[in-house]
Amino acid sequence: MLRLHVFNTGWAAVQEKHLYVGGSTATRIVPVLSFVIEYPKGLIVFDTGLNPAFAARPRQYIGWLGNSLFPFRSLPGMNLSAQMQARGLAPEKVSHVVLSHLHYDHTGDLRAFPQARLLVSRPEWRAAQSPFRRWRGYLDKEYRGLTISLLDFPLYNGQTPNRALKGNYGLDLLEDGSLIVIPTFGHTQGHQSLLVFLPYGVVLLAGDAVYVLENYAKPATQPHAHFPESAWRTLIGLRALVKGDPTAVILPTHDDSILRKLQRPDIVIGGAYPMP
Ligand SMILES: [Zn+2]
């Protein structure tokens, strides 16, 4: 049986207007989640959260500009691999790390899984090498020198992720239909998400394709998407996914409100540290 573990690796204080178009100037504390899927032969990680440096010296680590734009914070021992160990999930058992995209709040603990296959979309990898990467949320010291498996989505043609449910749209990770990587471009050039077919219903690990519930509930796109048109199309596709399957749940990286309402034996929430 598949099981999903959710960990919070830190938080940031963000004005709502930066999360969705039409948001207020009120400040919201958002988490930085990471996910671990337990499957019969091992573990799969989706996004690795913040680097341990965010607990001690965030400004030195990310630089003055990054620290003032996105003031992420963490606590000692709150990084993903430390929390996994505390829960008895050995980091060396991780076979794959799926990265939604390469922004530094998703790649922070990447080097804790040297044996795992690292999966990134080809356009995302290209964007993360651009000369302007530092100004676009990429911190290449977190992924420089690592061997990355690049994913192509040859069937991507702008249709909704409903197609993924029929198995002809994304990458079937374990080749049994239980984990499907789908393109959700827009937040960044090559953003991707992971559909997890859990025993009690499908969960979409959205990454930053959806920042917060309001994005797809209203719908209201995120204001700073690198590719706004793709981001909008992705959002509409994700709405269709949830409407088409009432048991489907979308879990973004930076909103735990949906998670708090879920009570399911196949989802383990929390860990050593509470959500913000
Ligand atoms: Zn993020």
Image (cartoon, helix red, strand yellow):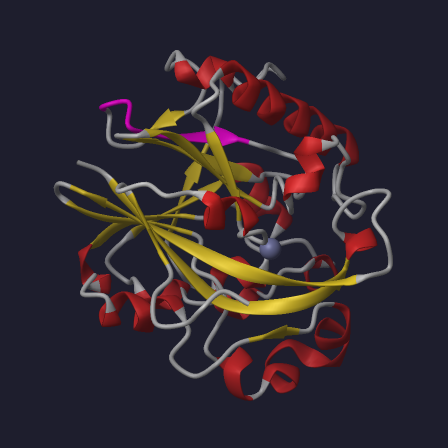
Task: Return the x and y of residue 52 as percentages of the image width and height.
Answer: 46, 78
Asked whether residue 215 appears in the rendered view, the answer is yes
- Is 271 covered by the magenta stretch? no
Front in this rendered view, residue 33 or 144: 33
Determine whether 24 is above or below 2 in the image: below
Q: Which residues are magenta?
A: 176-183
Q: Residue 101, can we see it?
A: no
Query: Residue shown at 74%/50% (left/top)?
Result: 19
Q: Residue 65: image x %, image y %?
A: 77, 75
Question: Residue at left 27%, top 41%?
Answer: 266
Q: How many marks?
A: 0
Query: Where's residue 258, x and y in %?
Result: 52, 44
Q: Nearer the viewer, residue 88 or 166?
A: 88
Q: At 69% across and 79% down in the image, what residue appears?
A: 63
For this view, does 114 lie left or right of residue 260? left
Q: Give above or below for 195 relative to 28.
A: above
Quadrant of residue 139 in the image? Answer: bottom right
Which residue is pictured at 27% across the width and 53% down the height? 116
